[in-house]
Amino acid sequence: MNTPSLTSSANPALIEVVRSNFVESVHHGALVITNPDGSVRTAVGDVEIPVFPRSSNKPLQALGMLRAGLEIDDADLALACASHNGEPGHVDRALALLAAHGLDEQALHCPPDYPLHEDSRVAAIRDWPGKRRAAMNCSGKHAGMVVTCAQRGWPLANYEDPGHELQQVIAETVVKLTGEPIASTAVDGCGAPLFAFSLAGLARAFGRLITAEDGPERRIADVMRAHPWLVAGTGREDTMLMLTVEGLLAKGGAEGVHAIALPDGTAIALKVDDGAQRPRNPLLVAALDALGALPDNPAARSVLDGLGRGYGEVFGGGRPVGELRPTDQLRRSLAASSAQ
């Protein structure tokens, strides 16, 4: 059976894993930086081939919900954009949003799970009878979807079906925001439809969200930046990025995907070919550094240094013995971008 590939064998090595001064592993992938007008400023690897953006797609899906007629407050909308930790505040807000529309946890079609947050997970395993749908990291998105359907009078039983009215509006929204057709439709880990498009399209979409003067696009960017804890949670990179880089919009996804946008509309999107999560933070910090977007504040720089290096440290015998670092090719490409 011929299965289409969503990665390019020509993508270069972006991050190398160094252990005791020896390059032990490399991560290949692609990274794009787009200008505020959506044009490509820097492309490393194939940034036009379709990829599944995974949860980096959530702000676009939430915009589709608004365009379908969803009416909720800002904090709930931030949760609809989230890949949250499943901490008590996340779970309680998802349940409250459902209850406000006469729905309960069983209305969610995402799979049940325990929280991602370690302390919350330990407490849940101890105290709950089993996994819960509201604790699954995508429960905010699913709550937003089913509430949209409840408000519009659309069927609830199949809200995640690609042919459902809601999903059709979301698909149209994705096409408009990315500026390109959907290359493939799949089932995401949470059960909702997942649309494939290019990294350039993903970056372009994030730039358009953050530069919109008003309307639902700008509202998505504003609520995420106003409620970064709801978007991710304690200790998560999206939370820390949005708290430390003023005006930044950030949303990561599974399989090594991440997208961010600066207040002026410059945007970055990346995909690690092997799906690893560990290279994402060093890649993001390196790109932000090349754009001169890292803050001068020592406390903020310390957090970002932790993301770029501490999260990428290589340990041996319980102590750091190496790091994840950008390859020379990536450094040269980013240097050329910083010169523009």
Image (cartoon, rainbow, N blue to C red):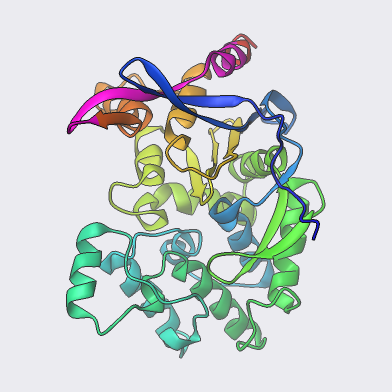
Q: In the image shown, does 321 or 340 lie closer to the viewer?
A: 321
Q: Nearer the viewer, residue 38 or 53?
A: 53
The one nearer the camera, 127 or 218, is 127
Q: Is residue 60 left or right of residue 321?
A: right
Q: Image height check: is 104 above or below 11?
A: below
Instruction: Check residue 298 for magenta coloring.
Output: no
| Residue at x-position 59% and y-position 64% | 188
* Total residue callouts: 0
Image quadrant occupied by the N terminus: bottom right
> From this viewpoint, is residue 247 visible?
no
Q: Quadrant of the C terminus?
A: top right
Would you say residue 106 is visible in this rendering? Answer: yes
Q: Could you say where residue 323 lies in the image, as x and y percent from the top left?
A: 35, 24
How far across and how far down the image is residue 61, in percent?
Answer: 62, 61
Q: Residue furthest front?
A: 1
Counting from the top left corner in percent of width and height, residue 62 is at 58, 62
> Which residue is pictured at 51% across the width and 52% down the height?
254
Q: Give the magenta range.
A: 316-335
**Which quadrant of the structure image shows residue 129?**
bottom left
Task: Examine the structure image and report whether residue 320 is included in the region drawn in magenta.
Answer: yes
Residue situated in front as seen by the camera: 95 or 274: 274
Left or right: 275 in relation to 65:
left
Q: What residue is shown at x 53% (from left), y 69% (from top)?
A: 190
Q: Where's residue 147, x and y in %? A: 54, 79
Residue at image position (46%, 90%) is 102
Position of residue 183 relative to residue 38, above or below, is: below
